[in-house]
Image (cartoon, rainbow, N blue to C red):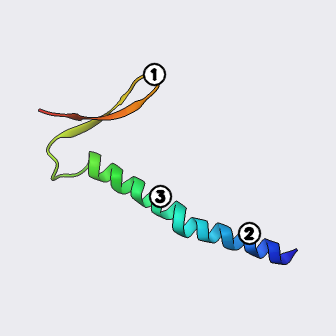
Amino acid sequence: MDFFLGIKMLSIILKTIFIYIPAIYGYWVFIYSVFFNPVNENEFAIQKTEDEIKIVEIVR
């Protein structure tokens, strides 16, 4: 039984390293690059309709 528990733990550790951490990192990089990037002079806004969410660019 300990063998299967070890495999389960290894699976959780590998998932965390290769899937969850890059996903969270990529998410924050995306948020920073879209909303807080000082190089980008245009602003973005999230436009939410009934069935979809779009990111639209506000051009001044």
Q: Residue at (74%, 73%) from the top-left corner?
A: 7
Residue 50 spot, x, y in % from top left: 45, 21
Element carrying mark 3: helix
User: Which amino acid type is marked by label 1?
Assistant: Glu
Identify which residue, 30 or 51, lies in the foreground: 51
Please indicate whether residue 39 sits to the left or right of residue 47 in the image: left
Identify which residue, 54 or 44, lies in the foreground: 54
Above or below, 52 against 42 in this view is above
Q: Residue at (81%, 72%) from the top-left corner?
A: 4
Above or below, 9 against 41 in this view is below
To which residue does mark 1 refer? 50
C-alpha distance separating marks 2 and 1: 40 Å
Numbered badge on residue 8: 2
- The earlier-in-sequence mark between 2 and 1 is 2
Residue closest to the far right = 1
User: Which amino acid type is marked by label 3?
Assistant: Ala
Quadrant where the C terminus is found in the figure: top left
Q: Residue at (15%, 33%) from the top-left corner?
A: 59
C-alpha distance separating marks 2 and 3: 21 Å
- The earlier-in-sequence mark between 2 and 3 is 2
Packing grade of label 3 (10 A; few <14, some 14-19, many >=20) is few
Residue closest to the far left = 60
Packing grade of label 1 (10 A; few <14, some 14-19, many >=20) is few
Please indicate whether residue 60 sits to the left or right of residue 37 in the image: left
Residue 12 spot, x, y in % from top left: 66, 67
User: Which amino acid type is marked by label 2?
Assistant: Lys
Above or below, 18 against 23 in this view is below
To which residue does mark 3 refer? 23
